[in-house]
Image (cartoon, grey):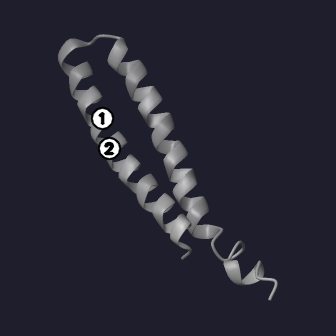
Amino acid sequence: MEPTSLILSIVSIVNMGILGILICIFGKMYGKTRAQLPLGMIVVAGMLFLHNVIGALAYFSMEEIFHMKYFHTC
């Protein structure tokens, strides 16, 4: 894997972990308070989580298509 894609993949996976933790915290907060704000925060964090899942899948699946050996002109 190209170093840039590897770094982006790792960052995306770390972001998914952090967002998963935030979703759990917001879920507990909603369970205790029944306030509307944590529900909105869960939706936003869920959308960011989905964005990171799609990004990580793109980094892994597009590696062969955009491999550096295809772009070398030597």
Residue farthest to the right, as pictured:
73
User: How many residues crowd mark 2 within 10 Å: few (<14), some (14–19), many (20+)?
Assistant: few
- 11 over 69 or under it: above or below: above
Q: Quadrant of the N terminus?
A: bottom right
- The percent coordinates of residue 47 (x first, y second) are 50, 35
Q: Is residue 1 left or right of residue 36?
A: right
- 11 over 1 or under it: above or below: above
Q: Is residue 6 left or right of residue 19?
A: right
Residue farthest to the left, as pictured:
32
Q: Name the image quarter holding residue 21.
A: top left
Residue in the picture at 45% in, 53% down? 12
The answer to whether mark 1 and mark 2 are in CB contact below 8 A is yes
Looking at the rendered structure, the kind of residue marked 2 is Ile
Give the distance between the C-alpha atoms of the residues marked 1 and 2, in whole angstroms: 6 Å
User: How many residues crowd mark 1 within 10 Å: few (<14), some (14–19), many (20+)?
Assistant: some
Residue in the picture at 45% in, 36% down? 46
Residue in the picture at 26% in, 13% down? 34
Label 1: which residue?
22
Label 2: which residue?
18
Q: Is residue 62 left or right of residue 15?
A: right
- The percent coordinates of residue 74 (x first, y second) are 80, 89
Q: Name the image quarter holding residue 20.
A: top left
Viewer-closest of 1 and 41: 1
User: Is label 2 in a helix, a strand or a loop?
Assistant: helix
- The percent coordinates of residue 40 (x first, y second) are 42, 19
